[in-house]
Amino acid sequence: MFDPTGPLPPAVYWRRRAVAMGAVLLAAVLLGWGVMALVSGSRPDVVPGPPPGPPVAVAETGPPPCADEAMRVTAEVARPEFRVGDRVGLSIVVTNAGNRPCVRDTNRMLRELIISTPGGKHVWSSNDCYIETTNEQPLLQPGQSVRNEVWWAGETSAPDCEGDRTRAQAGEYQVVARLGELNSTPTTFRLTS
């Protein structure tokens, strides 16, 4: 049984037996590995641990937006009196009047300076002929302000830049600053001839 017999040399028969034995051994190893994978895959090991705790709150990544209630908007005029035809220096000042830092959107289209007569007739607005938007979101500490300055050329304008522009006449005027839904109290100034 162990002595090879046949027309070929004995070494050939021994090689064939070694290859057959190796194939059987490899098949047995693969079969055992497959059975172990199936058994361990269907029954995962359970390691007892502590019960889950309460959910953890995730911290915000930065200061919150400024609420309208925490903001103060004012309109300022460079001086109380100008001559007709002079450029009038105006400012819109946005202040964090709250007690926490916050971020406020002061996009160019959200802020506006509006000049009118004391009777409320529209004279000019910084947004009448201006349609460019900007991305401005400053972080304001409590009490901190951001100021934007505008020059009024002393001419009238209308919404959507309609109609002719004429030189404003001598008299009393008032300017109101707006940021979104927030409006300042009117600030008065005079044009003299």
Image (cartoon, helix red, strand yellow):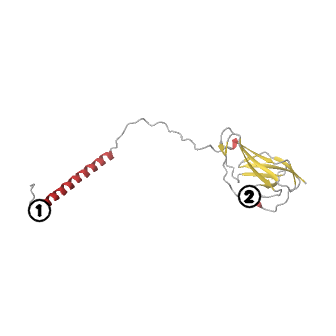
Q: Position of residue 193 (x, y in %)?
A: 91, 54
Between the C-alphas of marks 2 and 1, the distance is: 102 Å
Identity of the residue drawn at 21% across and 52% down: 25
Nearer the N terminus, badge 2 or badge 1?
A: 1
Residue 6 relative to residue 45: left or right: left
Q: Position of residue 107 (x, y in %)?
A: 69, 52
Q: Which mark is residue 172?
A: none
Q: Residue 64 versus residue 140: which sits nearer the camera?
A: 140
**Does dot 1 land on a helix, a strand or a loop?**
loop
- Which of the 4 quarters of the picture holds residue 22? bottom left
Label 2 vs label 1, nearer the camera: 1
Three-letter amino acid code of the residue under disc 2? Tyr
User: Mark 1 = which residue?
Assistant: 9
- Which of the 4 quarters of the picture holds residue 143? top right
Mark 2–mark 1 CB contact (< 8 Å): no
User: Mark 2 = which residue?
Assistant: 130
Q: Position of residue 161 (x, y in %)?
A: 77, 60
Q: What crowding class fits label 1: few (fewer than 14 Cα within 10 Å), some (14-19), or many (20 or more)? A: few
Eyeballing the image, is 66 above or below 22? above
Q: Position of residue 83 (x, y in %)?
A: 88, 53
Identity of the residue drawn at 79% across and 58% down: 158
Residue 33 relative to residue 174: left or right: left
Q: Residue 11 versus residue 90: which sits nearer the camera?
A: 11
